[in-house]
Image (tube, rainbow, N blue to C red):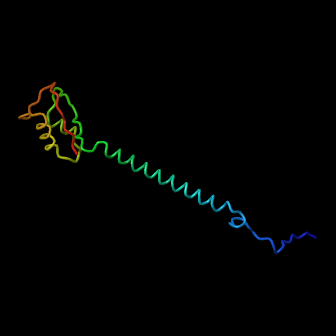
Amino acid sequence: MRAQRTVSSGLENTVGKYEFVPYISPMKSARRTYQRRRVGALFIVAVVALALHTGGGAGADPEPLRYTVAPGDTLWDIALENTSPWEDPRPRVEEIREANDIPDATIYPGMRLELPRSG
C-alpha cells in the first residue's frame, strides 16, 4: 500500500501573505517605485535629446551648395541635376540666377555658382 500524506488542518499556504512574510510587500513596492523612476528618467532624457536634436538647426539658413561650371554646362542642366524628377526646373533656374546675380542665362566654364537649397 502506498503511504498517504495527510496535511493537518492547521497549516495554510502562507506564501506572499504580509502577516507571515513582512518583507515581501515593501520589497515589491520599492521595486515598482525604482522602476517608475527609471522609466521617468529615461523619458525625460529622451525628450531633452529630441529637443536638442530638432532645435539644433532652428533658425539657421541652410548652406548653399557650391558648383563650378564645366564646359558645355547650362543653367537648365544644372537645375535639372538639382531638382527632383517630378518638379519643374524653371523656378530652380530663376533661383540660381537670382542667387548669383546673373542678368541673363549666360554662364562660363570656371564660374563658381551658389545653388540655393530648396525646401
Examine the rendered structure and indicate whether residue 114 appears above or below residue 41.
above
Nearest to the observer: residue 117 or residue 13: 13
Q: Position of residue 93 (x, y in %)?
A: 14, 39
Judge left or right: residue 51 versus residue 26.
Answer: left
Residue occupying image coordinates x 55% and y 54%: 34
The extreme left residue here reads 103
The extreme bottom residue here reads 9
Q: Where is residue 98 in the image (x, y as percent from the top left)?
A: 11, 38
Quadrant for the C terminus, please.
top left
Where, by quadrant of the figure, is residue 118 drawn?
Answer: top left
The extreme top residue here reads 110
Nearest to the observer: residue 99 or residue 74: 99
Residue occupying image coordinates x 29% and y 42%: 57
Q: Position of residue 70 (x, y in %)?
A: 18, 27
Quadrant for the N terminus, please.
bottom right
Nearest to the observer: residue 109 or residue 4: 4
Examine the rendered structure and indicate whether residue 100 appears above or below residue 5.
above
Q: Position of residue 92 (x, y in %)?
A: 16, 42
Judge left or right: residue 25 versus residue 71.
Answer: right
Judge left or right: residue 4 versus residue 96.
Answer: right
Count numbered badges in the picture: 0
